[in-house]
Image (cartoon, rainbow, N blue to C red):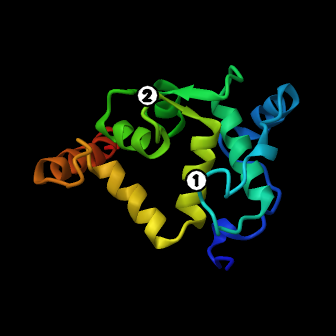
Amino acid sequence: KSSSRGGCRPSTGAPPTHGGRSAMKRNSIMRRPPTHELTPKSLGLDGLEVDPARIRQFAAEFALVDTRGEGRVSRAQMARFVGFGDESSPFVDVIMRWFDTRDTGHVELRDYVRTMLVLTCGDESHQLDLAFAAYDLDGNGHISHDEIARIVCAAREPLGRAA
């Protein structure tokens, strides 16, 4: 069944806002992400109906971060992309756990697209699995008081910088 959430509706075709139109145009001229290989089924999201334009949109966003065209981005690139200059932030740890699902130290195109599909189109079960994995810092299957405290402190960090 198709979800009624905005992330699963057909894309408007508007380019992503990260980096502005000129960066989008420059990157799309240089290379096109291999989105033909990315389907919900190939990403382990069987049964999720997504407009292919949505996948292309996420791939285009990824291309803005992947400035070298390597098909992967580093922790530092992800930190800058989400608005943190300092990649040592505990909040960047959470972002990396969401997107670096195979714990390789970088985010690949397929990981980025899969996570964005889960966040915007996934059912509650997929989203809960993703959230739990992000907050289970030691990967032991439990979220401890200390893990919650670290996440809360990390979430406060950007607020302290802005003040």
What residue sits right under mark 2 in the picture?
A: 85
x and y, in percent, of residue 63 in the image: 70, 34
x and y, in percent, of residue 80 in the image: 50, 31
Residue drawn 20% across and 55% down? 142
Quadrant of res 52: bottom right
**Residue at the extreme right of the image, as rendered:** 29
Q: Is residue 158 found left or right of 11 in the rendered image?
A: left
Label 1 to label 2, Cα distance in Å?
22 Å
Q: Is residue 89 found left or right of 61 in the rendered image?
A: left
- Is label 1 in contact with label 2 (beta carbons under 8 Å)? no
What residue sits right under mark 1 in the picture?
A: 116
**Residue at the extreme left of the image, as rendered:** 145
Q: How crowded is mark 1: few (under 14 residues within 10 Å), some or many (20 or more)?
A: some
Above or below residue 3? Residue 159 is: above
Residue drawn 12% across and 47% down? 146
Residue 56's disc is none
**Can you tell which of label 1 and label 2 is closer to the viewer?**
1
Above or below residue 23? Residue 51 is: below
Q: Is residue 66 found left or right of 24 in the rendered image?
A: left
Q: How crowded is mark 2: few (under 14 residues within 10 Å), some or many (20 or more)?
A: some
Residue drawn 22% across and 47% down? 140
Element assignment for label 1: helix
Element assignment for label 2: loop
x and y, in percent, of residue 21 in the image: 78, 40
